[in-house]
Image: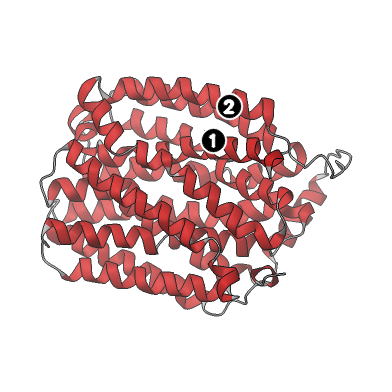
């Protein structure tokens, strides 16, 4: 385990940055709206831009993983994340914010799938979901940093200076990742590098997309983490501001609690597939409870703040089952297709995160930033989970869900 510690720490560091970038709009949304003159629709697209960029480059990222390895791919793309952070810091309007977040999205496109790619090589299959839960849970330090700490930074030195500092941190983490991380354990021989022909690339992609059992996993992944992050990372802050009139630090405190709940949820789900001898039961159970919590939020007119916080926090805990889906998806593919396989699975999540935050933006704008607007949005998000689960229920449990 000691030999894996540097790998795990740097995977946590690189995913912390991605988490911070992806949810940073939520707590400072009112300040961004004020300083850049954003509409609710533009704020929604700013949230979606990051994930649209992620979605657009997942196929090449998968090919780069298989050809060059995760180490070089992550380090190279982090240059774009740095430039995007600088662009956001200098933003003067919605176009700059959306463009900067899209560039950061490309820069972070390899971060989370590098965890799956590398952990699947460094850990035994039966340990994969647990290893992923460790890294994904710890990565939410970035989510927590984008709550109260970012609110405090915005209130003291301004959100622009916050993104300048983040650009420096991104460079340092990328350099450490390149210097320390290795794509395979030392006891596993490295296969000779070989450039694939276009026909071989197309054949590999076709093999991935025709893999039996892929569609149900994609359907659930389209809505699972996507729904949770739409609330926590984009619209939770505006909801607390528009409906409950919380200031930046108060919003940050609630989002901090939601982020902690997500971390605890990830840790709880990690070993559950082995305890229950099923990944499918874990996912469907988490999805059902998450749907119920969203329905309650949709049906209650302006609930008391304490109740709203409890419901939102519980939702972030129970909707943190995405790592189980990722592990199930990785188990579908042989090692030679690991890069393209895991990024294909990730495309569903990225597509969902491209659509849902923007869709909620249109809803909020149509209903005038009111309590009703957010209730409709919660109902739509619950419906999405129902749709994903209705397809996923036909999936089969992977063999690696069972203990050895």
Q: Earlier in the sequence, mark 2 or mark 1?
A: 1
3D distance between C-alphas at marks 2 and 1: 7 Å
Q: Relative to residue 351, is residue 78 depicted above or below?
A: above
How many circles with numbers are drawn on the protein? 2
Element at label 1: helix
Which mark is drawn over residue 382? Answer: none
Q: Is residue 200 above or below residue 330?
A: above
What residue appears at the point 75 percent right and 36 percent down from the top-left corner? 68
Q: Position of residue 317 (x, y in %)?
A: 37, 60
Q: Report x, y in % for residue 247.
A: 14, 38
Disc on res. 174: 2
- Which quadrant: the C terminus? bottom right
- On the image, the x and y values in percent for residue 155 come to 20, 26
| Residue pointed to by mark 1 | 14
Q: Cβ–Cβ below 8 Å for labels 2 and 1?
A: yes
Q: Which residue shows up at 64% across the image and 42% down it?
A: 61
Neighbour class for label 2 at 10 Å: few (<14), some, many (≥20)? many
Residue 108 visible, this angle: no
């Amino acid at each position: 385990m000691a030999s894996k510690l540097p790998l795990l720490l740097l995977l946590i560091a690189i995913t912390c940055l991605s988490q911070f970038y992806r949810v940073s709009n939520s707590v400072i949304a009112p300040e961004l709206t004020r300083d850049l003159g954003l509409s609710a629709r533009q704020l929604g697209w700013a949230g979606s831009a990051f994930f649209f960029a992620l979605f657009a480059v997942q196929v090449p990222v998968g090919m780069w993983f298989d050809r060059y390895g995760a180490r070089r791919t992550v380090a190279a793309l982090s240059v774009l994340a740095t430039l995007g952070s600088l662009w956001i810091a200098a933003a003067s309007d919605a176009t700059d914010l959306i463009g900067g977040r899209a560039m950061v999205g490309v820069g972070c496109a390899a971060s989370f799938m590098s965890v799956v790619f590398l952990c699947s090589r460094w850990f035994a299959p039966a340990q994969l979901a647990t290893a992923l839960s460790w890294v994904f849970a710890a990565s939410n330090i970035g989510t927590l940093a984008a709550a109260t700490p970012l609110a405090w930074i915005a209130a003291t030195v301004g959100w622009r200076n916050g993104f300048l500092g983040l650009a420096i941190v991104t460079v340092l983490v990328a350099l450490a990742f390149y210097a320390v991380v290795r794509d395979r354990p030392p006891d596993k021989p490295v296969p000779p590098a070989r450039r694939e022909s276009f026909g071989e690339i197309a054949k590999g992609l076709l093999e991935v997309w025709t893999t039996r059992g892929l569609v149900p996993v994609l359907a659930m992944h389209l809505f699972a983490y996507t729904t949770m992050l739409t609330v926590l990372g984009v619209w939770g802050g505006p909801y607390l501001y528009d409906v409950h009139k919380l200031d930046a630090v108060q919003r940050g405190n609630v989002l901090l609690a939601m982020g902690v709940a997500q971390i605890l949820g990830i840790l709880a789900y990690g070993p559950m597939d082995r305890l229950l001898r099923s990944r499918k039961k874990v996912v469907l159970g988490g999805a059902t409870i998450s749907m119920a919590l969203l329905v309650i939020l949709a049906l209650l007119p302006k609930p008391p703040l304490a109740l709203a916080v409890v419901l939102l926090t519980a939702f972030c805990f129970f909707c943190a089952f995405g790592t189980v889906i990722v592990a199930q998806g990785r188990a579908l593919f042989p090692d030679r297709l690991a890069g393209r396989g895991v990024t294909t699975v990730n495309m569903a999540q990225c597509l969902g995160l491209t659509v849902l935050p923007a869709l909620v933006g249109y809803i909020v704008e149509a209903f005038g930033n009111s309590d009703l607007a957010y209730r409709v949005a919660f109902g739509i998000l619950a419906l999405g989970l129902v749709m994903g689960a209705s397809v996923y229920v036909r999936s089969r449990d992977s063999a690696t869900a069972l203990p050895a």
